[in-house]
């Protein structure tokens, strides 16, 4: 088990039970899975770019990514049905906790001019939180020598929480650095 699993089981779960006013410890929200994806966009014609995106995701997560294909054709975007539009990895179990630990303790602190994650962005109201990265080079596995083209990626954390408040409490307990609520001006 990793530090994050131990922290969740020993500290966060009991704290969340009290904070959210739950009677049963099994009702406490937990992280189900983490999905990391890279949208290829305009480079979908370039097979080499697709392979680069796949290798980057594989290095970051330690798991082989799958390709995402377009479900329908959109002529304005020069997109045909079945065309590769991205690549993604879904992490569960031990790999998920290892990735979250790395994300909180080594990746997020590498941001320049970082003051915390936005409270108003990223939550979907159903217990999920999504954060976008403009540059994939903030991950420790990616060296500057490996970079041909800088691109972004998205990390979605899917939880069993039912609302934004529970999701925020869970992620804060696991160490995610959110900005503090600003007091209202008088």
Image (cartoon, rainbow, N blue to C red):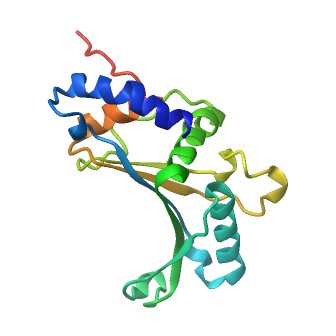
Q: Which residue is drawn at 43% across and 90% down?
A: 81
The furthest residue to the right: 145
Is residue 119 positioned above or below 152 on the image? above
Q: Position of residue 5 (x, y in %)?
A: 47, 37
Q: Is residue 184 found left or right of 107 in the rendered image?
A: left
Count up the numbered dots: 0
Seen from the viewer's position, the closer of residues 120 and 104 is 104
Q: In which quarter of the image is the N terminus?
A: top right
Seen from the viewer's position, the closer of residues 138 and 172 is 172
Q: In which quarter of the image is the C terminus?
A: top left
Q: Is residue 140 found left or right of 88 in the rendered image?
A: right
Q: Position of residue 167 (x, y in %)?
A: 30, 39
Q: Where is residue 150 in the image (x, y as percent from the top left)?
A: 69, 58
Is residue 163 positioned above or below 20 on the image? below
The picture quadrant where one finds residue 120 is: top left
Seen from the viewer's position, the closer of residues 26 and 163 is 26
The furthest residue to the top: 186
The furthest residue to the front: 1
Q: Position of residue 126 (x, y in %)?
A: 24, 50
Q: Is residue 78 found left or right of 164 in the rendered image?
A: right
The picture quadrant where one finds residue 47 is: bottom right
Is residue 141 positioned above or below 54 on the image? above
Q: Residue at x 55, y 52 (%)?
A: 95
Seen from the viewer's position, the closer of residues 28 and 40 is 28
Q: Which residue is drawn at 50% across and 35% down?
A: 4
């Amino acid at each position: 088990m990793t530090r994050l699993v131990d922290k969740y089981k020993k500290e966060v779960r009991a704290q969340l039970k009290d904070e959210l006013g739950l009677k049963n410890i099994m009702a406490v929200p937990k992280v189900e899975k983490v999905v990391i994806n890279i949208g290829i966009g305009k480079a979908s014609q370039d097979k080499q770019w697709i392979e680069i995106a796949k290798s980057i995701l594989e290095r970051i997560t330690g798991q082989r990514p799958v390709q995402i294909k377009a479900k329908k054709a959109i002529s304005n975007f020069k997109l045909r049905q079945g065309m590769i539009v991205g690549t993604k990895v879904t992490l569960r179990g031990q790999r998920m906790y290892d990735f979250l630990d790395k994300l909180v303790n080594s990746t997020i602190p590498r941001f320049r001019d970082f003051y915390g994650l936005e409270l108003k962005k990223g939550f979907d109201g159903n217990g999920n939180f999504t954060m976008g990265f403009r540059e994939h080079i903030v991950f420790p596995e990616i060296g500057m020598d490996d970079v041909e083209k800088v691109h972004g990626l998205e990390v979605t954390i899917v939880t069993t929480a039912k609302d934004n408040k529970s999701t925020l409490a869970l992620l804060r307990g696991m160490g995610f650095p959110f900005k503090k609520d600003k007091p209202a001006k008088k």
